[in-house]
Image: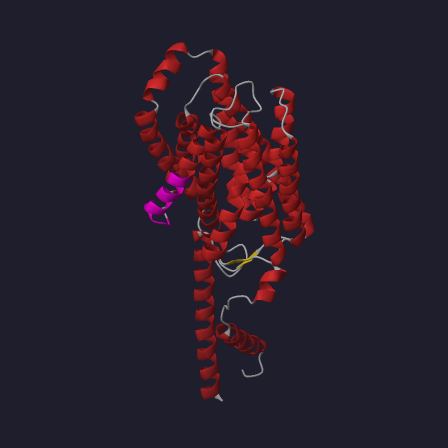
Amino acid sequence: LLSSPMLVDRKMGDAAAESWEGEELQSPSREDVVDTIIPWKKRIKIALMWQGVSVLLTGTAVFSQLLADEGVNLPTTQSFLNYLVLGLLFGSKMYLRGESPREPWWKYCVIAFCDVQGNFLLVLAYQYTSIISVQLLDCFTIPVVMILSCKLLGARYRRMHLVGACTALVGLCMLVTADSIEGRTTSTTPARSPLLGDMLVITGASLYGVSNIGQEFMVKERDRIEFLAHLGAFGAIISGIQMGALESRQIRSLILNGSLTIFIYFIGFNLCLLGMYLSVPVILETSSAAFMNLSLLTADFYSLVVALLLFSAKPSVLYFAAFGIIVSGLAIYNVTGDATSTSTSNNRPYVLRTPSEEEMSEAIIATRTSQHRSYKEVEEMNESIA
């Protein structure tokens, strides 16, 4: 019995079980985290995917500018339909799965509030400043995201990351100066208050930064469908209340007197915005909020081209200088590579992100524990027989 192949295999299994049982899942060292940095081929693929989102972002900017030129000032209403569709689509998916939320509702409510107000302020800014200014100034989201990533997600940035971000901020300050001096928009309607518009964009970009970090955490650590369902539901509630309180009179006027062109612009804006909200969480699962915002800076170039072609714009030389400085900051950051992090499951392979993975792990542990006990019992029986 002691020399039987079955007993030898069981003894080998016993040793393997003991070896496995003694291992503990340790947090990765800095070197281990660096080794998990996305390779260049995959990084290029992710960057190209972000460029598709960048085109959609440019589409929302163009339709917002067109609506502003038509005299439409409904920043909350413009985004309401997007949240409603998200809530209905992913809320029904979550209901069919029969799963309970894995995070408290108030966390999703805070993220949705920041997202709604970010949309509100950015869309409102088109009433006061130019499409180029809005697109360039919203890169203020980058330093906000980097700071919050360090504090909340444990991101580690190198010096060149900071140099790239600071370079972009220099271009941002130059743009504010140029916009306040020039005082004109790239559309056919004069800018009412360029400096106020710039401040609205910076505030909205800061709120977007908070929303981006919350979104990155939720899609990596929790569940993308759950996040989009709650974002849509709370976003629709918050924007619906704000819409009724601030824009009810304008909505009635638009329904009674609005032209077909305005409704087409509304549909175009919401289609672009919905495409962004559907794409970003998917890409964020293998990327980061900081890399996303830096990659989306190319939307500034697309907006500049659209402004030149569609709005017959004649931007100041300072605009091009500011854009060049911001793009230089983007290049410096991307050459260094994305920041490392030890607080998200994208860089922690030992963290389980879905209930099915957790159940599978528990089943494996239970099976191996049971096998380990069986091996012990067989060994004791063999010793007693011997």
Vertical placement of residue 42 versus 19, above or below: above
User: Quadrant location of the N terminus?
Assistant: bottom right
Vertical placement of residue 286 versus 188, above or below: below
| Snapshot quadrant of residue 120 | top left
The answer to whether residue 294 is left or right of residue 256 is right
Residue drawn at x 52%, y 19% is 189
| Snapshot quadrant of residue 187 | top right
Vertical placement of residue 3 versus 83, above or below: below
- Residue 59 or 315: which is nearer the viewer? 315
Residue 9 in the image: x percent, y percent? Answer: 57, 75
Residue 250 in the image: x percent, y percent? Answer: 36, 18
The answer to whether residue 39 is left or right of residue 362 is right
Residue drawn at x 46%, y 79% is 376
Residue 286 in the image: x percent, y percent? Answer: 57, 49
The answer to whether residue 332 is left or right of residue 22 is right
Residue drawn at x 56%, y 18% is 188
In the rendered structure, which segment of residues is drawn in magenta? 102-114
Is 357 colored magenta in this rendering? no
Is 106 colored magenta in this rendering? yes
- Residue 9 or 86: which is nearer the viewer? 86
Residue 94 seen in the figure: no
Name, please, the residue furthest toward the bottom.
Answer: 386
Residue 366 seen in the figure: yes
The answer to whether residue 43 is left or right of residue 66 is right
Magenta stretch: helix, strand or loop mostly: helix
- Residue 161 or 137: which is nearer the viewer? 137
Residue 248 in the image: x percent, y percent? Answer: 32, 21
Residue drawn at x 57%, y 65% is 30
